[in-house]
Image (tube, coloured by chain):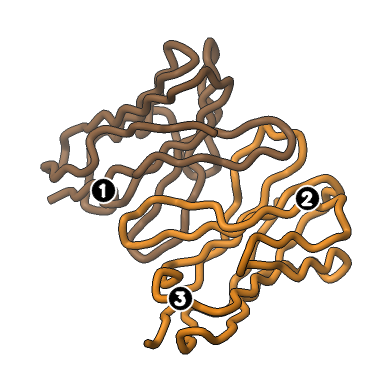
Chain colours: A orange, B brown
Amino acid sequence: AQTVTQSQPEMSVQEAETVTLSCTYDTSESDYYLFWYKQPPSRQMILVIRQEAYKQQNATENRFSVNFQKAAKSFSLKISDSQLGDAAMYFCAYRRGGGADGLTFGKGTHLIIQP
Amino acid sequence: SAVISQKPSRDICQRGTSLTIQCQVDSQVTMMFWYRQQPGQSLTLIATANQGSEATYESGFVIDKFPISRPNLTFSTLTVSNMSPEDSSIYLCSVGEGRNTEAFFGQGTRLTVV
């Protein structure tokens, strides 16, 4: 079975600085997807960024980028120019390819933005 | 994209009773997923609900405790039966299928069992 590990329960960063959230995963599959979701206090799960395992190029979405190391099974999220609105729980998630499965989530990282 | 409406948004229930959570999607989907998020914890998949067939439950979750209905391609319900305080959690409905598709989530139901 696949597992997702987030080893940082909490991270703190100064506004406008850069922070990196770590995620590792374990799977025997070759076809899969990785996601970072953000959950603010409103509880709504918001997709931050997505990476297809077959793509070597790291995904980027504005201030958010990932460092996808497939051989190391590592998928870290970098947030540049941190903003107060980035404060939330961040969950790393895995889904097997084919699209018929639910997501496996890591335990989450609570991101605090210091003004 | 998909817009998911989940009801109720929160409820406080007596132990021993049951609560049914509704999930309505604005488009037809084959699969709907139900997750549980215990206080301060991550999301755990409860079951996958396909229209026209019985739901598939993950290890640790059983149909008697979490019966699921899926009467059509836009609607599903999850019932939390014979509740105890340990069932106090956020329950989330999700959709998203096919290659290269993100998962969309409802806003969740915060359940407190007293």
Q: CA–CA distance between discs 2 and 3?
A: 27 Å
Helix, strand or loop status at disc 2: strand
Q: Where is residue B82 in the image (x, y as percent from the top left)?
A: 23, 35
Task: Inspect the image, locate mark 2, and give the three-letter code of the amino acid beneath it.
Answer: Glu
Q: Nearer the viewer, mark 2 or mark 1?
A: 2
Chain at tag 1? B
Disc 2 or 3, which lies upstream in sequence? 2
Do the residues at discs 1 and 3 belong to one chain? no
Q: What residue type is labelled 1?
A: Arg
| x 54%, y 14%: residue | B53
- Mark 1: few, some, or many residues within 10 Å (few <14, many ≥20)? many
Q: Residue at 36% of width from left, 56% of height from top?
A: B38
Residue highlighted by disc 3: A83
Q: Name the residue under label 2.
A: A52
Q: Is mark 3 on a helix, strand or loop?
A: loop
Within-10-Å neighbours for mark 3: few <14, some 14–19, many 20+: some
> What chain is tagged by disc 3?
A
Marker disc for residue A78: none
Q: How many labels does the image show?
A: 3
Q: Mark 1, mark 3: which one is toward the viewer?
A: 3
